[in-house]
Image: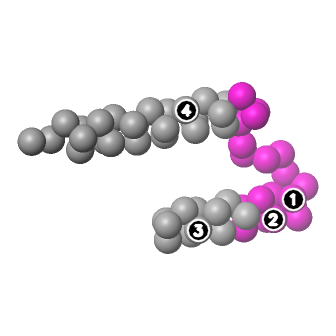
Amino acid sequence: MKEIILSLVAGWIVGVLFGWLKLPLPAPPLIGFVGALGIIFGAWSIEQLKQLLRP
């Protein structure tokens, strides 16, 4: 959970800096974000399945 909070804070700081400097945001469009979440969920699912099938 600590990593998630640190990641969100770091992302917020970068967003504030980019907004303040009036630079384009270095983020993918929404569909790219959803795809990245799908990748993370898929990797998490495999880890859960491995733990479930572990003897």
Front position in the image: 45 or 18: 45
Would you identify the image quadrant in which residue 9 lies? bottom right
Q: Residues within 10 Å of mark 1 (few under 14, many from 20)?
A: few
* Amino acid type, callout 4: Gly
* Amino acid type, callout 3: Ile
- Could you tell me if the residues under marks 2 and 1 are in contact, i.e. CB atoms within 8 Å? yes
Which residue is identified by label 1?
Answer: 19
- Could you tell me if the residues under marks 1 and 4 are in contact, i.e. CB atoms within 8 Å? no
Which residue is identified by label 3?
Answer: 5
**Residue 16 relative to residue 39: left or right:** right
Q: Secondary structure at mark 4?
A: helix
**Residue 43 relative to residue 38: left or right:** left
Residue 12: % across, % down = 73, 64
Q: Secondary structure at mark 1?
A: helix
Residue 15 covered by magenta stretch: yes
Quadrant for the C terminus, please: top left
Q: Secondary structure at mark 3?
A: helix
Q: Residues within 10 Å of mark 2 (few under 14, many from 20)?
A: few
Would you identify the image quadrant in which residue 14 lies? bottom right
Q: Residues within 10 Å of mark 3 (few under 14, many from 20)?
A: few
Which residue is identified by label 2?
Answer: 16
Q: Which mark is residue 30?
A: none
- Could you tell me if the residues under marks 3 and 4 are in contact, i.e. CB atoms within 8 Å? no
Gap in angstroms between the C-alphas marked 3 and 4: 20 Å
Q: Which residues are magenta?
A: 13-31
Residue 26: % across, % down = 72, 45
Q: Which mark is residue 38?
A: 4
**Residue 24 relative to residue 41: left or right:** right
Q: Secondary structure at mark 2?
A: helix
Gap in angstroms between the C-alphas marked 4 and 2: 26 Å
User: Image point 24% across, 41% down: which residue?
Assistant: 52
Residue 25: % across, % down = 79, 47
